[in-house]
Amino acid sequence: MNPLILTAAITGAETTRADQPNLPITPEEQAREAIACYEAGARVIHLHVRDDEGKPTQSMDRFTAAIESIRAAAPEVIIQISTGGAVGEPFEKRLAPLALKPDMGTLNAGTLNFGNDIFINHPDDIVRLAKAFDEYGVVPEVEVYESGMVDYVARLVKGGIITHTPLHVQFVLGVPGGMNGSPKNVLYMMDHLKEMIPTATWAVAGIGRFHIPASLTAIVNGGHIRVGFEDNIFYHKGVVADSNAQLVARMARIAEEIGRPLATPAQAREILGLPEK
């Protein structure tokens, strides 16, 4: 079976220290967490940043500090920044950190209800963002929250708006207001993506209670997975995880026990279409 790429979403924009006391917030904390996750089997660090008060920010200074700290601590890890920011963040601020030229960044493929908020991704902004990825030479990870977004992404690929190949698509399932992360839905999304964009690779981020079932479904069906405090703060029901690395290590162990090898750093780069390091 193809090697498994584990992504660690170590901070996110919604989780707070009140929710998860072990949440890494400062660049130094994020670097320590990144190296621990890398050593546990993660090959990609999905990065949101926070200000000094712990609030989500798209500050260029904060992203610069976090990226530099992580690269110094774990030079082989793939850094993937969020262009989603916090729900309601102005588009120009969301786009700006691509200028720092991380390895990858997220490209959200549509608007949806997000809890009590609306996560707005206007079609014009999606096109602008896709073109910015090409301009800065950053590889996109396209994030979809329901099946219609797959069709929309296929249209952007056909129209030459999204150009990177192989395209990597992540199913973010279980957001309140979006498609849930049941195994049935993961398999449906997998089949639909294969129909619409046969060459695409895929991963799943199961939110909250869908963390384990969605991840296991992806592991046994050739997909890749994202874990971490952005998506899930618990190790068991009601038991807060000690660290992001603990969540990574569990899925790495399960994958290895069922015969799914973990990707090496070089393999992860090849699968995602990133240049050799």
Image (cartoon, rainbow, N blue to C red):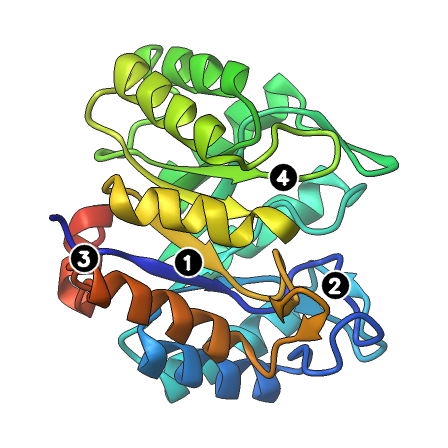
Residue wearing tag 3: 260
Measured in 3D between alpha carbons, the distance from the residue under mark 1 to the one under mark 4, in whole angstroms, is 30 Å
Element type where label 4 sits in the image: loop
Residue type for callout 1: Lys
Which residue is at a point 42% across and 77% down the rendered structure image? 37
* Disc 1 versus disc 4: nearer the observer: 4
Crowd around label 1: few <14 · some 14–19 · many ≥20 (10 Å): some
Measured in 3D between alpha carbons, the distance from the residue under mark 1 to the one under mark 3, in whole angstroms, is 31 Å
Disc 1 vs disc 3: Cβ atoms closer than 8 Å? no
Q: Is residue 195 above or below residue 181?
A: above
Q: Which mark is residue 174?
A: 4
Disc 4 vs disc 3: Cβ atoms closer than 8 Å? no
* Disc 2 versus disc 4: nearer the observer: 4
Q: Is residue 23 among the parts visible in the rendering?
A: yes
Residue type for callout 2: Thr
Element type where label 2 sits in the image: loop
Residue wearing tag 1: 101
Crowd around label 4: few <14 · some 14–19 · many ≥20 (10 Å): many
Residue wearing tag 2: 15
Based on the displayed image, in which of its 4 quarters is residue 257 positioned? Answer: bottom left
Element type where label 1 sits in the image: loop
Residue type for callout 4: Gly
Residue type for callout 3: Arg
